[in-house]
Each structure stands twice: as C-alpha cells, then as structure tokens.
Amino acid sequence: MFDKLEILTKDDLKEMGDIFGTEISFRMKRKEMVESLSHYFVNNCKRWLSYMLESDLNLIKALVDKGPRISIFLEYSDYISLAEYFGIVESDESDGNFKKVWLSQDVYEIVKDNIGDALKEGEESGRFEMERVALGYLNLYGVDTFSHFLDFMMSYSLSKNDANYDLLLDALKHSPLLKISRFEKYIASPCVSDPMSILKRRRAFKGTRRNRFSPSDAMEAGRNAPYFTFGLNTAEGSLVWTILGELGYDEQERYREMHNIWTSSQLINQDETANDLFISVLRKQDSINDFERYSRYVNAIADYANKLPKWLLKGNSSYDAGYLEIVFQESDSDAYDLESGSIGDLKIDKDGFVPDWHLPKPTVSNGYPALPDSSYGMAVRHVAPDDPCPCGSGLKYKNCHGRHLS
C-alpha cells in the first residue's frame, strides 16, 4: 500500500483521503499528502476500516486468516474492490482467468488485530444492512437519479421505524458507496460499466414506468457482493439454481453464475451473442448427453432472465414490461449448426453423443425485434390493433411504426 501511495496523483490521494475518512488538502505538496496518508493508515486503523465496504472487509479478513504475503486466487468480478484499487490489498492480474491477492507484511501488522472488530461493528451498527439495501436498489435499477435514490433509502429508514433524515444522510455519507457510485445528478450500480449508455438507450422505452421495490427486495439484490443475485426464491430462479447444481457447480459458483445471468440479460442486442447469457450451460455441454436436457436448461435460463429486473426498463422485468423478452422460436428442422442459425446440433460418434450446441445472435431494435432469421430472438408481446403501442408513442398500435417491427 505504501509503495502505491508514492505513485498516486494528487487527485487520487485526495480521493483516497475522502473515501477513508481523513481530510487531505490540495494545498499540501504531493510529498506531504503521501506522508499524511501514511501516518493516518498506520495510526488510525479502526477509523479507516470503518469506512470500507463490507466486501472489502471480508476480503481483508480472508487474507489475514491466510497470513502475510500468502496469496489467494479470486475470479474477476464486475468491478475492482476499493482495497485492491488503492493498494491496501496487493494484487497480480497477469493471469487472464484468476488474479492473485495478498497482504503485505506492513498492512497485515496494521489490520490483523482490528479487522474482526471492524466486521462486528459494521454488522451490529446496521451499517452493513444499509449498505446492502443501497447496493440492492442500485443493482435493481442500474442507474437512477440521486433524488430517487434518497427517496428509496428514506422508505427503508421508515420501515426500520427511523424517520430521521439527517441520520440517514450521515450514514450514507460515512459509506464510500456514494463517493464511488454518484455522478452529476445520477447514481449507478458498481456493476454498470457505462451508465450513460443505459440512460441513452432507456429513451427507447420512455413509456415504461419505474418499478417499485420493497426494502426486502433491495436487501436480496444487495447481498453476496460482488456476485449479486435476485429472484432465487421464485420458481424460475429455484429451477436454474437446481440446474446449476446438476451441472456440477458448487454453492459459491452458483451464486456467480446466477449473477452473470442477471447482468448478461441486461444489454443483449443484435451486436452481441447469446453465449454470455447461457455460458453456464455451454461450458458444461460435454456432460449433457441429450438435446432435450440441453433445451430444458437453456429455456429455464431464458425464463429466469425474463423475470429479472432490467436496467433499460427501470427495474421492470421483460415479462412485466413486454419488451426485450428472450424467446426460442420454432424451427423447421430438428437440429442445425451455428452457420444455419438454429439452436444447435448433435454429433454422434462411436462413443455416443458428443454435444456441439451453439446459440445464434439475439436481435432487438428499440424494444422491438428485427425480423427473425434464426431460431432465437427478442420478442414483444402480442398487441391488439386498437391498444396503445408498447413503444410509448401514445398512438394506437395499428397506427404506429411498431406494427412493422413486431
């Protein structure tokens, strides 16, 4: 960590001080800023640990349990942790599949006697619970205005019989979540890599009203960082969870795969393949011995993805909003290869079935499907001629451009 301080810019040093609870003045020389931060991290461990996200503290605890300079291997998540970004946790990302993380001897000595108390304090004070709810709200909507975010958090506070707005603001200010997620008048989930793209593409669905989630919904969507999940208690989610178990994934891997399905279902369009959405099945296809089983698996994932909240739809699911629904369409033939544009094919050799199944590109255009030329695509629900067009224009469907695309 202290080596990294030497290479950070003045802006980064100021940001680091703000996030971890100490003021660093721009009027200082860069060397003075480094010295001030170094002194703070050595002598105020309990304080700066109390400003860290729960997932960062859990990572530090796991590394303390291992000991100094002993690495553990982590998969790459949607976003880097604050502990890694600022060098509190050392990391090596030279391997494209896994990264190594460890604690230096200096940092280990600083945190080893304080990390347990920091985790206990975060749980008992309710700070972790508030953080989970805030993260869950952001994960459900993807991007929202900061004012709507505060309204939701106040509803959560009221559900806890605490109507003190000032206390809520102080608690949020104490968390680094706002510092890393807020931009201009908006706030975004850490899982969203390009929030402005979400806002821009959302215009195609301007008739879609914001879904309203309960604090318990947000709590569910904000747990298990960095592999956030939602809908595991639904029939669709429970089925996919069971399928992942049948495919050989352990519990932690299943959380990862359910999270990947959720995030992969957000932005599929005609320029992206379906592989990311169905990768949990595709990477295990050699263990699937018949097409019916394969079809059941991918259809279950499609059903689950259609029930999940979508960022483009302001938290509505594809089924509820009638947009961006993932469907499998009828094919004139039983099985084709990727080039012919169908679900997949079966190859037979002397050892029996060797599955080689592929999914073609899904297609979507501003909420409507392009005319399908494959067995897989996006679809809009059936709309009666005199009903309002789902595009939000206010025109009857028979008089709107949408009738040409659906």
Image (cartoon, rainbow, N blue to C red):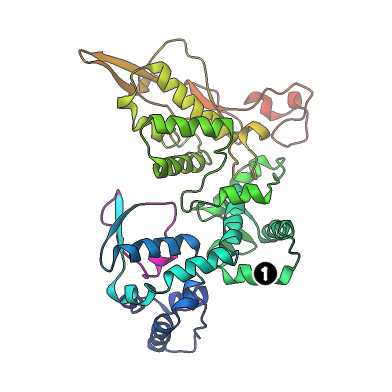
Tell me if residue 339 comes above or below residue 265 in the rendering.
above
Question: Does the image show residue 364?
Answer: no
Question: Which residue occupies 42% across, 16% down?
Answer: 292
Q: Is residue 191 above or below residue 172?
A: above
Q: Quadrant of the N terminus?
A: bottom left
Q: 109 or 154: nearer the eye?
A: 109
Instruction: Give the extent of the magenta segment.
Output: 76-97
Q: Residue flagged by tag 1: what amino acid is it?
A: Leu
Residue 151: name its quadrant.
Answer: bottom right
Q: Residue at x 33, y 16 (%)?
A: 346
- Residue toward you, 235 or 327: 235
Q: Residue 21 location in percent, x, y?
A: 52, 77
Quadrant in which the C terminus appears? top right
- Left or right, residue 202 beside residue 363: right
Q: Which residue is mark 1?
A: 169
Q: Is residue 82 magenta?
A: yes
The picture places residue 100, in percent across and down from the top left corner, at 29, 58
